[in-house]
Amino acid sequence: MGLSLSHEVLSLELRDPFRIARSEHAEGTRVTTVIVELRHPDYPDVVGVGEGYPDRFYGETPETMAAVFPLLLADVDHIALAIDLGAAEAARQHLARLGATWADRIRGNGAAKCAIDIALHDLAGKVLGVPVHAMLGLPAVAPPTDFTIGIDEPSVVAERARRAADFPALKIKCGGPADLATLRAVREVFTGPIRVDANTGWSRTDAEALLPELVELGVELIEQPFPARAYRDLAWLQERSTLPIVADESCVALEDLDALVGVVAGVNVKLAKCGGIAPAHAMLMEASRRGFRTFVGCMEETSVGIAASAVVASLAEWVDLDGNLLLADDPFDGLELGPDKRWRLADRPGLGLSRRSA
């Protein structure tokens, strides 16, 4: 096929410090993400743009992504993606098959896969003249996004919650000694649902002490309280909790659903973990089939990653797509957040985004 790829590593400043229980990116003040561009020789004026967020927790860096890109592109040539057939259904089937091929051939490396997968979807949509969501047969409307606030002093978190009080729900990062004080401070300024995300930072003792307090505070769900493979601990807590326990770090790819059946109530699907739009689509469908409640989440990505995630967000019950809102300066235009906090998917071909001029 002769697809050519270029990539750029971006270091982006955050609007506010953003720390989680396992923070590492410049102590929560900057993040690193990778933007790729794909070109097809038959369409020299069309560029497919994608993004992958390398997280060391999953063993990825910009360097590992660059090393894996040629292997992934070789499979694209092998699959012979038929974006030139002029049929959205043909493109969708080829992209889905490509995601399955990558899952079989190359373990992990979700961010590298995600970057190329998104760029291929964007490229195909532009060549076909249709938005990506329409190419996949998905609606443009999805549940509203929440807004996430990182770990900080309780008073600081409460002030940020007050500023974000027009969002329908807030996700509060936990996993430290001030968790209860923080959540109480947030509840004083915010009346809507609170979603708690401990990012593997709790022990059973922590969870047992906090659970009745979380119920009293009207918390909606608890995300990843324990380490990724602590299935017995997760099941132990879900048995005792009236709140749904949602797996995030425990649920990276489609294959992880097997171990979570009967363990947790919900799963958080992220494109940068599972490998892009096509794998996320398949994972959300399978998770729903197995009876999981579903969450579409994100990393601290630009509008490229968020727009791609919004494509499949209609398949989820909960949406946490605010990564670009956490950035001091998003380098892309074209994705709009409505007053109801729902992402408005563009009716332009592909993802409908453009790079801001320097």
Image (cartoon, helix red, strand yellow):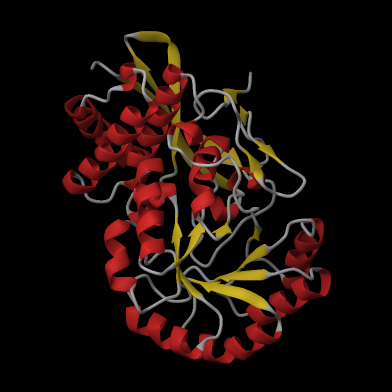
Q: Is residue 315 visible?
A: yes
Does 181 appear above or below 125?
below
Between residues 45 and 109, which one lies in front from this camera angle?
A: 45
Q: Nearer the viewer, residue 7 or 253?
A: 253
In this image, 3 relative to 77: left or right? right
- Asked if 249 appears above or below 52 in the picture, the reply is below
**Residue 23 point in image, percent of width and height:** 51, 60
The x, y position of residue 35, in whole percent, is 45, 31
Name the residue located 41 percent from the left edge and 45 percent from the top edge.
54
Q: Which residue shows up at 55% across the image and 47% down it? A: 300
Residue 126, how many percent across, how many down? 46, 20
Seen in the image, is 190 located left or right of residue 183?
right
Horizontal placement of 141 versus 121: left or right?
Answer: right
Q: Residue at x 69, y 69 (%)?
A: 193
Position of 357 relative to 96 (above/below): above
Q: Nearer the viewer, residue 125 or 253?
A: 125
Q: Is residue 61 visible?
A: no
Q: Quadrant of residue 357?
A: top right
Residue at 53% of width from left, 49% of height from top? Answer: 313
